[in-house]
Amino acid sequence: MNDLQIFPVILCGGSGTRLWPRSRAAKPKPFLPLLGDSTLFEATLARCDRAAGFAAPVVVTGAAHVAHIEAQLHDPAGAQVIVEPSARNTAAAIALAALRLPEDAVMLVCPSDHHIADTAAFRRAALAAADLAAQGWLVSIGIEAQSPETGFGYLQRGEPVGPHGFRTARFVEKPDLERARQFIASGDYAWNGGIFAFGVGTFLRELEAHAPAILAAARAAVAAGHGEGHLFFPGADEFAAAPSISVDYAVMEPTAHKAMVPADMGWSDIGSWDALHAAVDRDADGNSPRGAVELVDCRNVLVDSDGPRVSVIGLSDVVIVIDGNDVLVTSHAGAQKVGKLQGAANQ
């Protein structure tokens, strides 16, 4: 890629409720093969592998997921796995990673549960973002907004910064539908996909300026931590003192040094069964059958069965998922509400 040391920082966690019953708290969606044979976590690592010029990854996860990480981290040489003693949101998680890296390095912060269809486009955007980060910018990769989604945050593009980037004029949290339509019509907004490039030293200075309590708790936790091979365990009591704030609120919104690199790379957060259906291969009628499934006169139907045979006749715009003894049936419109099910919350 270039001479920069670009360390992928992979954030792994999640409650596993939005893709219930396939995804569960014990094994949330990063660790499931939802698209093809690889899990979303494995695909994230592959996009940022050393053959493409990235440094060894830093994975930040909770204790409940260490076994999944170990099973799917196929090239652990040089990698670090930071085991959070408690969940304190993304700003504190990224701070832990930064404190375990060289100050002159660049971090590429990636969620582990997103799908990106165009790996080459992702790597081009990552390199452009890393170049800006090395110059002192805190960089978001802005996802080309394809439709007026109300479930995503938005980034407004400002004046150009270098050949591929722009200042971030403002962050906008999830808008209502009318505002989202205005954003799409203006052409000045991208979705905030939660992918960032930070110079390690720059990030730590900005965190100290805008959220010093988070940095202090992370520093104390690292100082009190211990390693076991490539696993690192921060101090639990020290880390628990960190305020639980996202990196967007803690640093990206207040900083005067925010920039964005737009990217069109076939991105999806796979945030619902409806989103998964849009990302997978479908037949001529828009159906996606997985497992022992027979469809007759159906349109835009996703059926995912882990065993029992499922026959569907004459339905449109529905999702049917069977996982063991649990069965989900919903319309595409209702798929956003799966996380509210008592069965998903109490799995």
Image (spheres, grey):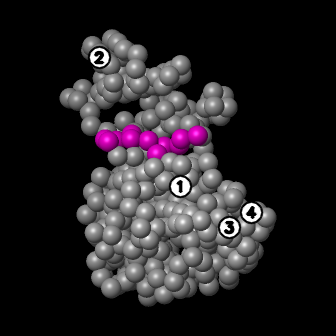
Q: Position of residue 187 (x, y in %)?
A: 37, 63
Q: Which mark is residue 236?
A: 4
Badge 2, how many Cα within 10 Å: few under 14, some, many 20+?
Answer: some
Whichever of labels 2 and 3 marks the residue nearer the N terminus, that label is 3
Quick check: 28 left or right of 254?
A: left
* Residue 307 higher or lower than 54, as above or below: above
Q: Nearer the viewer, residue 252 or 181?
A: 252
10 Å crowding of disc 1: few (<14), some (14-19), many (20+): many
Residue shown at 65% from the left, 34% from the top: 345
What amino acid is at disc 1?
Answer: Cys
Q: Residue furthest front?
A: 229
Q: Secondary structure at mark 2?
A: strand
**Inter-mark Cα distance, 4 to 2:** 51 Å
Amino acid tagged 4: Ala
Q: Identify whether 315 is placed above or below 276.
A: above
- The amino acid type of the residue labelled 2 equals Leu
Q: Are marks 1 and 3 in contact (CB under 8 Å)?
A: no
- Nearer to us in this view, 267 or 85: 85
* Magenta highlight range: 26-37
Q: Residue 87: give its label.
A: none
Look at discs 1 and 4 and give the one toward the viewer: 4
Q: In the drawing, what numbered circle is on residue 12?
A: 1
For the residues marked 1 and 3, what is the alpha-carbon distance in whole angstroms? 16 Å
The residue indicated by pointer 3 is: 234
- Camera-nearest label, 2 or 3: 3
